[in-house]
Amino acid sequence: MTLAGQAPTADAADEAAPAAVGVQSLVRGLAVIRAFDAEHPEMSLSEVARRTGLTRATARRFLLTLCELGYVRTDGKVFALTVRVLDLGYSYLSGLRLQDLAMQHLERLAATVQETTSVSVLDGTDIVYVARVPTKRIMSIGITIGTRFPAHATSMGRVLLAALPPEEVATRYASVPLERRTSRTIAALADLLAELERVRAQGWSLTDQELEHGLRSMAMPIADAQGRVLAAVNVSSHVSTRDAASFRALVAEPLADAVRGIESELARTSAVSRLMASH
């Protein structure tokens, strides 16, 4: 540690020098890796040097080091990345949760429709909120991550229940009464199963003041690459803003875009996980 205005001692300079060199080496090594892309999957030494701004000697040194570490391969003439470079991002990707992957898409959706957006998962006969971007207070009950609502009375719950076989839904509700949250709530199992059949066929659900008076919501399912429904995303609005038909017209396409974006993120993460597990 040095005082303000005081030159660093020789010892301090000696300690700082290796750190500075290490950082510079890391920056250059990453620059070499990032020089490869879809348009440049294979490059000669001269091409790598030109794209990174390094001298040929420096580029060669880093390429050979990366070859020794298994991140780059060469036939003596051209260089290319190996699958091992995925290790560099695997720890981050494998640690991403659904809510992390969904947030940017929820934020974009909320900004597009100017309404509250959420993601939930099914737990028994309840939905559990795992991500949410509120734009305004639309319910008398405050909603946070972890909030639960009865699935049968919500749009997200219905698309999640619709992904189950009807007999599984019947089993889940065999000992659970269908709570009538408002006068509009479906409260008979036969009616719920019929509604789920419609949801299953159309791929979305719209509930109108079934969870709470004044609340309207539209939801679509989020599926993995194998088609298994993992979660649901919705847009919620107060009924005073527009009628049901106008709400659906406003929300449907942006909501579908958000679902596609989230599913694309899930597929990409899953593909990296499978590739890493195979090598």
Image (cartoon, grey):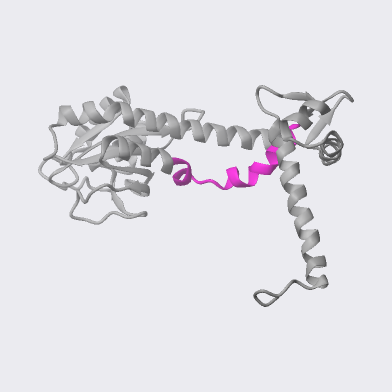
**In the figure, is residue 43 to the left or right of 99?**
right
Secondary structure that dominates the magenta span: helix
Q: Is 92 inside the magenta-drawn segment?
A: yes
**In the figure, is residue 98 to the left or right of 34?**
left
Above or below, comparing residue 1 to residue 219 in the picture: below
Which of 266/15 is in front? 15
**In the figure, is residue 95 to the left or right of 105?**
right
Above or below, comparing residue 278 to residue 103 in the picture: above
Q: Quadrant of residue 276?
A: top right
Q: Position of residue 231 (x, y in %)?
A: 40, 39
Q: Residue at x 85, y 28 (%)?
A: 74
Q: Is residue 170 visible?
A: no
Q: Which residues are magenta?
A: 81-102
Q: Quadrant of residue 185?
A: top left
Figure quadrant of the C terminus: top right
Q: Position of residue 153 (x, y in %)?
A: 23, 42
Which of 39/221 is in front? 39
Q: Is residue 13 visible?
A: yes
Which of 118/172 is in front? 118
Tell me how many marks there are.
0
Q: Is 83 inside the magenta-drawn segment?
A: yes
**In the figure, is residue 148 to the left or right of 136?**
right
Which residue reaches farthest right? Answer: 76
Which residue reaches farthest front? Answer: 5
Q: Position of residue 2 (x, y in %)?
A: 70, 76
Q: Residue at x 68, y 43 (%)?
A: 88
Figure quadrant of the N terminus: bottom right
